[in-house]
Amino acid sequence: MKTDAALRILSGHQDRILAHLASDRALLAAEGEGARPALATRRWMLARLLREYQLFKHVEIFDPALAQGDRLGVAARLKARCTAIGESFAAYIACWSSAAIDGRWSDYAAATQRMFDALARHVVEERRAIDTLLAGVERIERPGPRCAPGGSLTRVPPTSSSFPRLAPIRAPG
């Protein structure tokens, strides 16, 4: 994929996430606890946006950079930070179930604002770092299948526990 195309797609993901966060902040500020049903629905919409964003970055940017030799470890650090913020969001979701929110609205609202702040900060900082990572790179290519010793087909294994490792495919016979 051409780098400028990847950056346009990345920017689209980031714009949707930041717009969603801004909308949720406004909803929370305007309606308070009355926003609870809408925020519950929108939280899952945000989870989907974040997952799509994460998959795009890992598959189209981080993994290709790692496969091409991440001499300074920039792509590895970005991928680790991405995984960490994803885990933080998953922990936030798990912590603030509907039952957990009951009688603790102000705690939930404060935790929600902190999560929104962390996500927005991550997206903005990550964009700057990815711009730097890809500066001067015209094209980024996904790592593809390659032959392993013995002729079996394998894929370049991911470097993060957020993606399952693929076992080598054994040739028949």
Image (cartoon, rainbow, N blue to C red):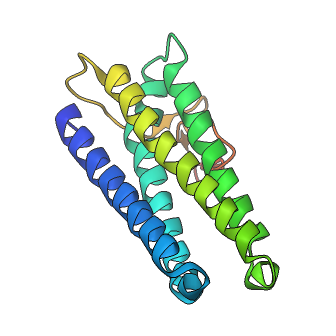
Query: Does 32 appear above or below 75?
Result: below
Q: Where is residue 68 in the image (x, y as percent from the top left)?
A: 42, 21
Q: In this view, does 78 lie to the left or right of 90?
A: left
Query: Left of 109 or right of it: where is 117?
Result: left
Tell me where residue 134 sits by quadrant: top left
Q: Quadrant of the N terminus?
A: top left
**Which residue occupies 53% across, 67% down?**
47
Residue 34: x and y, percent?
A: 56, 88
Q: Residue at the spot x=79%, y=76% of the render?
A: 104
Of 36 and 67, the residue lying toward us: 36
Nearer to the camera, 106 or 145: 106
Q: Can residue 57 be seen in this view?
A: yes
Q: Which residue is drawn at 50% across and 34% down?
A: 147
Give the mark count: 0
Q: In this view, does 23 lie above or below 170?
A: below
* Residue 143 seen by the camera: no
Q: Residue at x 49, y 41 (%)?
A: 121
x, y percent for residue 154? 55, 41
Q: In this view, does 15 lie to the left or right of 86?
A: left
Instruction: Name above or below for residue 136 compared with residue 59.
Output: above
Horizontal and vertical percent for residue 60? 37, 42
**Displayed quadrant of residue 52:** bottom left
Instruction: Pick out the residue farthest to the top.
Output: 71
